[in-house]
Amino acid sequence: MSDSPLPPVDELPILPNMAEYKLDLAVSDQGAIYIFHEKAFEEPLNWIEYDEDIGMLYCITKLGRIKGLGIKIQEVMQNSMVGINSIFVVHMKSENDQTVIEVPLVRAT
């Protein structure tokens, strides 16, 4: 989390997407999805929403703000997302210091 406070949610409901983050998506041999990122999120995550129609992921914070992943999910990865209910989000603080959280995955309707 960042030390700089954000304005109230009603003033800034949508955060800049993660395009400027160093991030990567991966699928394990067991079919688990991982998002690896180096920069901390501004707020704790509540869930990740998947829009199948456009192949995009959106992180929803506990305060209800929306933060897009900023990249289109490749078709191979989209096929892997069928039937999963959570994504592992890995904050890579350094090579030897990582924080892993499991975040629920919701499909946009």
Image (tube, rainbow, N blue to C red):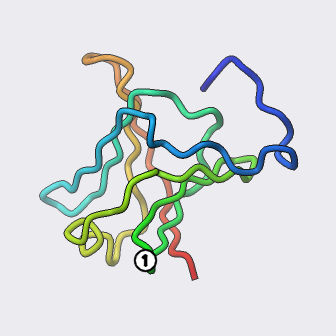
Q: Hey, which residue is sitting farthest left in the picture?
A: 29
> Does residue 70 lie above or below 1 as drawn?
below
Q: Quadrant of residue 15?
A: top right
Callout 1 amino acid = Glu
Q: Residue 36 at what x, y percent from top left? A: 33, 39
Q: Residue 78 at what x, y percent from top left? A: 29, 71
> Does residue 40 lie above or below 54 as drawn?
above
Dot 1: within a 10 Å radius of its alpha carbon, few (fewer than 14), some, or many (20 or more) residues? some
Q: Quadrant of residue 98?
A: top left
Q: Residue at x 32, y 70 (%)?
A: 81
Along the line of sight, the residue nearer the viewer: 17 or 104: 17
Question: For numbered disc 1, what is the local secondary structure?
Answer: loop
Q: Residue at x 45, y 51 (%)?
A: 70
> Does residue 101 lie above or below 55 as drawn?
above
Q: Residue at x 57, y 57 (%)?
A: 47
| Residue 78 as seen in the image, left or right of residue 39 | left
Q: Which residue is mark 1?
A: 52
Along the line of sight, the residue nearer the viewer: 12 or 26: 12
Q: Residue 69 at what x, y percent from top left? A: 46, 51
